[in-house]
Amino acid sequence: MKFIHLNATEYSKFADKSPYKSFLQTAEIAKLREENGWVAYYFGVEKDNKIIAAAMVVAKPTFLGKSTYYIPGGPLLDYEDTAVVNFFFKNLKNYAKSHNGYLLHIEPYYELIERDRDGKKKPDGFNHQKALGNLKKLGFLPTHSDNPKYLFVLDIKNKKEDELFASFKQNTRNLISRATRKGVVVREIGREELNSFKQITASTSERRHFSDKSLDYYETMYDLFAKKDEVKFIIAEINDKKPIPVAAAMFMTYGDEVIYLFSGSDEKYMKEYNAQYAIQWYMIKYAIKNNFKRYNFYGIQGLPDPNKPGYGIYKFKKGFGGHVVELIGAYELPLNRFFYNTHKILSKIKHLK
């Protein structure tokens, strides 16, 4: 095996065909990161003149001039292939250490345990504990991530619209039908209307106390992904003399899946019009028509628990069918113990203050 540097084109050619691909591991996201001060690299593992593993890696000085190396949504490899895992990370570790790195942070888009729609383990399902073991043997430690560990996913491969609609919970079907009767119109918008999209997500973030992305972020994502039809900004409107936007959502349409990434709703119209249900059904139909294999409702807050915050989000997504997906999680590997431990201590002191 050889550890090699790739250019963006070589990397993208591999990534687009990888079974472990994620929009977070694209050259487009590398450009987004570069606009925020990161430097992007592309590495691969070659065997018999064929690339068998690769990663888009970004690096940035984050502590006393030392750099964090970060692999969002990756690397793209089989985490149960011990030889490949060891070879890739050994070489990446050496490279990062020799280029001022003190920490390597990874967030693989790799499933750990097969679960059903209630989040319970499937008795005959896969369990990739070997993948965890491989990472732990290399010294990786579990860490926090802003990206979700648990997702909710609807398999749509070879499914028909009427078949899927019939599989939704009765209440979900009723709310989709009600939105249609109420005259909710769903449509895709272009870059020139992203300000309207942002107004809805901003008001929602204020109401629900979470951080919204900036308008610049949405515009940049449009610029990076729209030319390949890999991002969709959707608005739902009602017509009261003139169209009124009442809900909005952003979707990634990369690889085999459609991903429901961000959304917002105007509180005044939520209960009467149920526009988010109309948006989901609009995009599920889009996914079926364009032969995507799965519709990813994206993050839920941990395994389903009626007594924990965020259960309502899971319940909304569960109404469309599907199942819980548990990813392997986020991990970090100390590259320089002195700087790593110093940073940990200072972070704890800052948190206590």
Image (cartoon, rainbow, N blue to C red):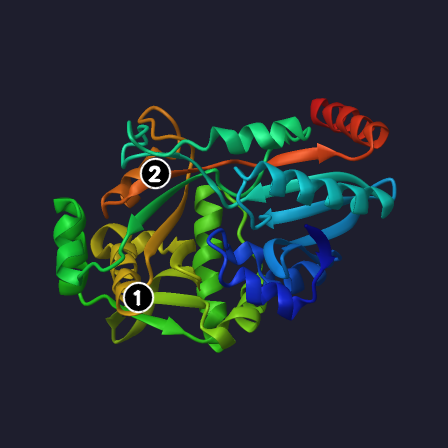
Q: Amino acid at mark 2?
A: Val
**Residue 231 screen position, x and y as percent:** 46, 67
* Residue identified by numbered label 2: 324
Image position of 181 (left or right of 147): left
Q: Nearer the viewer, residue 148 or 12?
A: 12
> In the picture, residue 34 is in which quadrant?
bottom right
Q: Nearer the viewer, residue 64 or 131?
A: 131
- Residue pictured at 32% horizontal, 58% vertical: 293
From where the camera sits, is residue 62 visible? no
Q: Is residue 279 left or right of residue 79?
A: left
* Whole-percent x, y for residue 204 in the image: 43, 51
Which residue is painted at 66% across and 67% down in the image?
8
**Which residue is drawn at the image coordinates 38% and 58% (left, top)?**
257
- Which circle marks residue 291 in the picture? 1
Label 1 element class: loop
| Mark found first going from the N terminus, 1 or 2 | 1
Question: Which amino acid is tagged 1?
Answer: Asn
